[in-house]
Image (cartoon, rainbow, N blue to C red):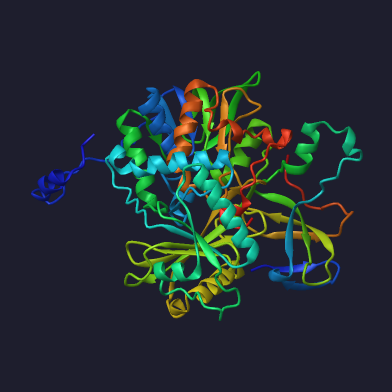
Amino acid sequence: MYHIYCPHCAEYREEEEFHAAGQAHLPRPLDPDSCTDEEWGTYLFFRKNPRGIHHELWVHAAGCRKFFNMTRDTQTYEIKEVYKIGEKPSIVAES
Amino acid sequence: MQHYSGFGLLKHSFSHHENWQRTWRNPTPKKKYDVIIIGGGGHGLATAYYLAKEHGITNVAVIEKGYLGGGNTARNTTIVRSNYLWDEAAHLYEHAMKLWEGLSQDLNYNVMFSQRGVLNLGHTLQDMRDIERRVNANRLNGIDGEVLDPQQIKEIVPHMDCSQNTRYPVMGASWQPRGGVARHDAVAWGFARGADSYGVDLIQQTEVTDLIIEDGTITGVKTNRYGDIMADRVGSVVAGNSSVIAKMAGFELPLESHPLQALVSEPIKPILDTVVMSNHVHGYVSQSDKGDLVIGAGIDGYNGYGQRGSYQTIEHTVQAIVELFPIFSRVRMNRQWGGIVDTCPDACPIISKTPVKNLFFNCGWGTGGFKATPGSGNVFAASLAKGEMHPMAEPFSMFRFHNGALIDEHGAAGVAH
C-alpha cells in the first residue's frame, strides 16, 4: 500500500484515501465542435500507458477532495514526486 | 509428435516414464518467417496453432521474452464463460466456447475443461434488471443462460449465505451451465505442442527490443538474442505490454495497463463444485482440482507493470468472499500474485490492423482474456493469414475509438475497471 503525500494537505496519507484518475496533462480541446473524429477520439481514449516514468492525475477522494499530479515509475512503483495542478513535473522520462 | 493415449501411458510405465519425448523443440530462429507472433502466452500460441492447422502457414515464429505461458496465462483464475451482452462480443466468446468444448480432443492434450457452470450474482434491483436483460440477450444469440432466484442458487451452492442477513443480500443470479474452468497451463502447453508439431518455431527467452518498419510497412523485429528476424506479417499478442510494442511502432493505443491480483488458499476437501462471481460485492471464487480455492480480486486503480498490486485490493475481495461464504472465514491463503492486464475503455478487446501495414494487434482483453483463448487465436490467425480481418474480429478494430462504435461490456466483464 502506498503512503502518498498530498500537496494540498501537506501530509502523508494511506492509499485508500486516494483515487488514481489516469494520465495527467490531457488538455481538453479548446473547440470540441471543430475537432475531427480522430482528434476527439484520441483525446478521449488514447493514452501513453508507459512502462517507466508516468505522470498521473490523482484525487484525494476521502480527504481534501482536491486533484494533484504525481510522477511515478509504473515498473518499480516508486513515487518520484507530487505536484499541484498547473505546475510542471521536475522529473521526466528520457526521450 | 508422439500421440498421447492411455495405451501410451501404459507402454511408458514399463520404462519408468523415462523415455517420453520432449513436448516441443527449442529451435534457433531462421532469418525470415511468413508470420512472427510476439508473445508466447495462450492467445499467441493459439494463434500460431490455428495459423498452421487451419491456414497451412507453418513458417511461423512465436517470440517470447520469458517462458511460454508465463504471463497472464499463468496468473488468471481460469474461468470460462460466454454470457456477454452485445452480439459482437457474444459471438466472439461463444466461438471460443465452442472451441473449448472440443479442445482436449483437438489438441490431444487434456486441458481439463470442466463445464461446472458459472453463477453471476445480483445484489440490487438494478443488478437483477441487467442480469435478466443479459440472459435474454444470450438466449437470443443461442447461448445458454438462466435467471435463478436465491432458493435455486442455494440448491446449487448450499454453503453460500443467500439469507437476508448479509450487507448486500443475494437477490438472484445468472447461470451459465456450459461455463466452467480449464487448466490454464495445459492450455498454453497444449497449443505450444500442437503448434510445434506443425513446425512452428517457439523462441523463448528472447525479447523483441524494436520493430523494423520501412515506409510504413513492418518488415521484421529486432531481438536481444538473435538480432534481426524478418517477417512478412507481425502479430503482437503481448497483453499488458501492448502499449510498449505500440510505442516502438510509433502510435498509441486506447489501453491502460493495470495490476490484477488473485490468490489461492491452502488445498481443502471438495466444497465448491461451480464458479461463483459477484460484480457488486466484487469477488469471484472457484475450487481447483487440487482443492485450493481460487479467488480473484479487482484491478488496482493506478497503471502498473510490476505484476503486483496493493494489499487493500485483496483485503476488499476477501471481505466479499467471507461475506458470501462465512464457512471460508478460517481458510488460510497460500499464495497471492498479480498480472498486468491491458484494459480497454469499453471492456472489449482490440483485434485489429494498425497504422503500420502488416502489423496486427490482438490486445485489450483486460481482465477476461483467458476464456477467449481458443477463439481469439482462431480469428486472429484467420486475419493474419488473409491480411484482412476475420468478420468476427472486424467490430473490434482499434479505430472504433475514433468512429464511436464502442461495444460496452462493462456489465458482463465481471471485474470492475
Asked if residue B241 shows in the view, the reply is yes
Q: Where does the image place residue B406, in percent across and percent down from the top left?
A: 67, 40
Q: Residue at x 47, y 46 (%)?
A: B143
Total numbered labels? 0
Q: Residue at x 66, y 36 (%)?
A: B247
Q: Residue at x 50, y 23 (%)?
A: B230
**Which residue reaches farthest left?**
B14
The quarter holding residue B310 reads bottom right
Task: Please say if B32 is above or below B79.
Answer: above
**Which residue reaches farthest top?**
B215
Q: Is residue A41 left or right of residue B337?
A: right
Foreground pick, A57 / B122? B122
Asked if residue B206 shows in the view, the reply is no
Task: Please say if B82 is above or below B192.
Answer: below
Viewport quadrant of the C terminus of chain B: bottom right
Viewport quadrant of the N terminus of chain B: top left
Q: Residue at x 55, y 74 (%)?
A: B319
Q: Where does the image place residue B348, in percent across and percent down from the top left?
A: 60, 44
**Which residue reaches farthest right?**
A31
Task: Please say if B190 is above or below A75.
Answer: above
Q: Is residue B250 left or right of residue B259?
A: right
Task: Please say if B329 is above or below B156.
Answer: below
Q: Where does the image place residue B296, in percent across and percent down from the top left?
A: 51, 62
Q: Where does the image place residue B278, in percent across and percent down from the top left?
A: 54, 64
Foreground pick, B294 / A89? B294
